[in-house]
Image (cartoon, rainbow, N blue to C red):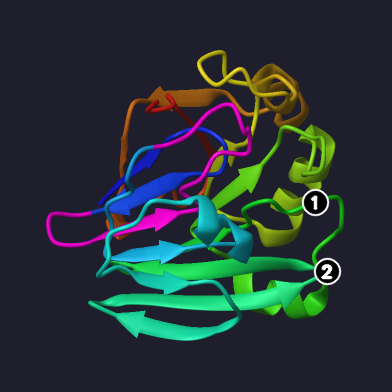
Amino acid sequence: MYISWHGNNYFKIQNSQHSIVLNPYSLDKNFKYGKAKGDVAIFTDPQGVGVSKLDEEAMVITSAGEYETKDIFVYGRQTNGHLIYLIIFEDVRIAFLGEYGHQVLTDKDLELVSGADILLVPVGGGAMANAKEANNIIGQIEPRLVIPSAYQVKELKNKADALELFIKEFGVKPEEHDKFKVSAKDLPQDDLKLVILKPQV
């Protein structure tokens, strides 16, 4: 499968048959996305649905619970006013934190996302986790691979901390990709990997 990032907390996960879009909306009122094409659309902020353009047939997930469609499994949890999700796709476990703020994850949260293979985590500060807080979250979840989001991107002109602050705090040399191809058998076994995705905007 491939993972792409479109700025803000908007990700797309897809293989040759199915696709999932995560938070396909802008956090800046001056920037709008086009139509998001996906079989499943997952929102950590339910209000994001109203400002998103989606396929009419997409399965839309905006609340805690368990969901299954087309070999895609989604588990959502409400915590501290936020939604967090664990997505299982092609036997890869992906933790998606969306607009997660300044809290630490609780033991109940960790029952859902601890040990996820891939963590999608905001690092740009403001209302969301900053570099230090994101690093603490990574330590709690202990994923194999981290993909940061919600940092400053010149194409979006968004107000957020620079990515370099997180890279320095995290202390792992990043790999950079336009789109990241990953499978369960290719996940790192020993070292934690940091993947930086070029925003597709």
Q: Which residue lies furthest to the top in this view?
A: 154
**In the image, is 22 to the left or to the right of 58?**
right
Residue closest to the far left: 16
Instruction: Give how far apart the Cα atoms at labels 2 and 1 are.
Output: 9 Å
Whether residue 192 is visible? no
Question: Total number of numbered labels?
Answer: 2
Looking at the picture, does residue 178 appear above or below residue 67?
A: above
Q: State the residue at coordinates (20%, 54%).
A: 15
Left or right for 126, reference 118 = right
Q: Which residue lies furthest to the right in this view?
A: 103
Towards the viewer: 17 or 183: 17
Residue 47: quadrant of the picture: bottom right
Quadrant for the C terminus in the image: top left
The spot of residue 119 in percent (x, y) is 56, 52
Q: Which region shows up in magenta?
A: 15-33
Residue in view at x 85 percent, y 59 percent? 104
Crowding near the residue tagged with mark 2, few <14, some 14–19, many ≥20 C-alpha atoms within 10 Å:
few
Is residue 181 toward the left or the right of residue 41 in the image? Answer: left
- Identify residue for label 1: 101
Q: Does the magenta stretch include residue 25?
A: yes
Image height check: is 176 above or below 90? above
Prevailing SS of the magenta stretch: loop
Spot occupied by residue 142 in the image (x, y as percentages of width and height): 65, 56
Q: Does the magenta stretch include residue 68?
A: no
The label number, if any, that marks residue 80 in the structure image = 2
Mark number displayed over residue 199: none
Helix, strand or loop status at disc 2: loop
Q: Nearer the viewer, residue 179 or 118?
A: 179
Q: Is residue 99 shown to the viewer in this render?
A: yes
